Amino acid sequence: MHTETFADPDNAVVPSYMPKITPYGFEAEYRSDVSNYPVGHKDHKGSGFEWLRHFRVHVPFTATLEIHFPEDKRLVIMNAASPVSARKTRMFAPICRNFDTTLPVQDVYDFNRKVFEEDRALVEAQKPENLPLDTSLEVHVMADRSSIAYRRALRTIGLSQFFTS
């Protein structure tokens, strides 16, 4: 995932993490040596930095990802989904950072648009389209822990059976 934008296709290790239930949904954080610099950036590979990513989900339609960069730099991306219909959603994604503030903001938008397009392609290719909220109906791997926590949180707010992706 995200091999065109920032991920390292030679590093497919999913760090161990455990989502923590919160009053509003769940959160998870993990550390990884996979860079968040764009592919081709001088620090994309081999920086030796351990990246902290903190993911917070406010059920049903808001999530934030805080990415800790070297030298106390932070990037925070919020995804706020606004369903238009059962199969169409408008996504709002405010982005904040405390570094590279002299770069044109359009460069940040363009890069993150590429990342979101990779996400969109994956989501739209999911089959079945209706995801079961009963996680016992599927076989899961460690990388699915956030997805499982999300589906359980949807059930907690009263949704049942299936959720259209």
Image (tube, rainbow, N blue to C red):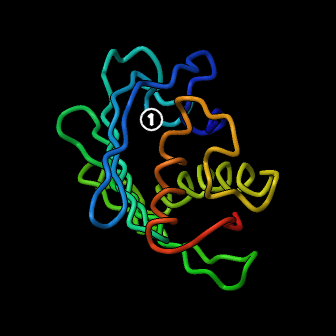
Question: Seen in the image, is 99 located left or right of residue 114?
Answer: left
Residue at (51, 65) in percent of width and height: 155
Q: Is residue 93 above or below residue 7?
A: below
Q: Residue at x 59, y 49 (%)?
A: 115
Q: What is the number of callouts on the image?
A: 1
Question: Which residue does the image show at 51% across and 61% down from the upper left?
Answer: 109
Picture coordinates of residue 45, whole percent (x, y): 47, 19
In the image shown, does 38 or 154 lie closer to the viewer?
154
> Residue pushed farthest bottom?
84
Asked whether, in this view, residue 116 is left or right of residue 98, the answer is: right
Q: Amino acid at mark 1?
A: Tyr
The vertical placement of 38 against 74, above or below, is above
Q: Quadrant of the C terminus?
A: bottom right
Furthest residue toward left: 72
Q: Image quadrant of residue 25? A: bottom left
**Position above or below: 75 against 38:** below
Residue 67, image quadrant: top left
Category of crowding for the residue at label 1, using alpha-carbon neighbours closer than 10 angstroms: few (below 14), some (14–19), many (at least 20): some
Location of residue 6 in the rendering, given as x and y in whole percent from the top left corner: 54, 35
Q: Which residue is mark 1?
A: 37
Quadrant location of the N terminus? Answer: top right
Please name whichever residue, 164 or 162, is drawn nearer the observer in this view of the structure.
162
Please tell me whether mark 1 sits on a helix, a strand or a loop.
Answer: loop
Image position, residue 127 (x, y; %): 82, 51
Q: Position of residue 46 (x, y in %)?
A: 42, 14
Can you say whether 84 is above or below 48 in the image? Answer: below
Report whether 15 appears left or right of 89.
left
Observer-nearest of 126 and 122: 126
